[in-house]
Image: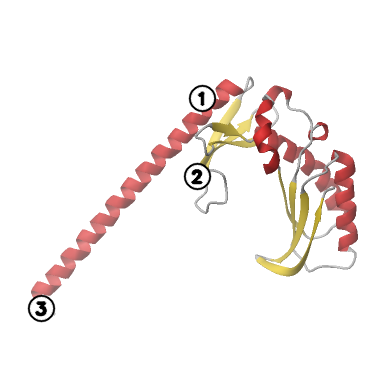
Amino acid sequence: MNKTLRRFLIGAGIFAAVGLLAVLVVFIAISGNNEDAVKEDAEAYTENRFQSETDVYGVLYDSMGNQPFKAAAQVRHVDDGIEFLVYRNEDNQLVDTYVSSKWEEEVTETAMAYLDEQLSGVENLDIRFEKSTSSQHRYTPEDVPSVREVEAAPSIYLDLNREPEDGDEEVFEAFATLLEDEFSFTDGRITVQYFDGDTKIKGGWTQEFS
């Protein structure tokens, strides 16, 4: 390789490295500024909406498009410990998930008391109230009713880290009946999936509330 070509390649490599570093610096700066803006929005929003103290402790990003936001502030209600999100919706209005998070915790407490006794291999229980989100802002944080007092439609996902076993479906059906009786759910569904580590195992179970 002649000297001219070698100098050109060295120069091009240095130029590329400097350019990459500059892009990285800009990206970090933008990310940091965006995080600060998300937190500042949430602090102003919660100060106005909540009479009691809240703590904005982080920012959650969604780069996969699985959530209704790109960035959401993570907030903790100091009095009851409920952790929830504050973000801008598709209309660029700030909204929060305090009500649904409170309902999720209420159902989780009852559900896990049953599952811990009846099922082995419980890896994860995820309870969501997406269908009810649009109506939740009619409640203030201070007058949120129990989920037992409203018509709410949960989507419940139960992951088991094991193979299917005889008798599982009877336990799942009894679990669905328990939730229907306890919370009067008439809409929503339960989905059960089996896993071996991160690998989904064939099988599973689904039932809708009715």
Say which mark, if any, is on residue 174.
none
CB contact under 8 Å: marks 1 and 3 = no
Residue 199 lies, with reference to residue 98, above or below; the image says: below
The answer to which of 4 and 63 lies nearer the viewer is 63
Q: Which corner quadrant of the image does residue 5 belong to?
A: bottom left
The residue at 57%/26% (across/down) is 46
Residue 121 is left or right of residue 20, and the answer is right
Q: Identify the residue at image location x=57%, y=47%.
A: 67
Rendered residue at 74%/39% (across/down): 105
Q: Residues within 10 Å of mark 1 (few under 14, many from 20)?
A: few
Earlier sequence position, callout 1 versus callout 3 = 3
**Looking at this view, is 96 or 196 the one in front?**
96
Q: Which mark is residue 44?
A: 1
Callout 2 crowding tier (Cα within 10 Å): few <14, some 14–19, many ≥20? some
Q: Is residue 22 left or right of residue 78?
A: left
Front: mark 1 or 3: 1
Which residue position holds label 3?
2
Label whose residue precedes the other's in the sequence (2 or 3): 3
- Where residue 154 appears, x then y in whole percent? 75, 44
Q: CA distance from mark 2 to mark 3?
A: 50 Å
Instruction: Determine the residue located farthest toward the bottom in the rendered image.
Output: 1
Tally of numbered tags? 3
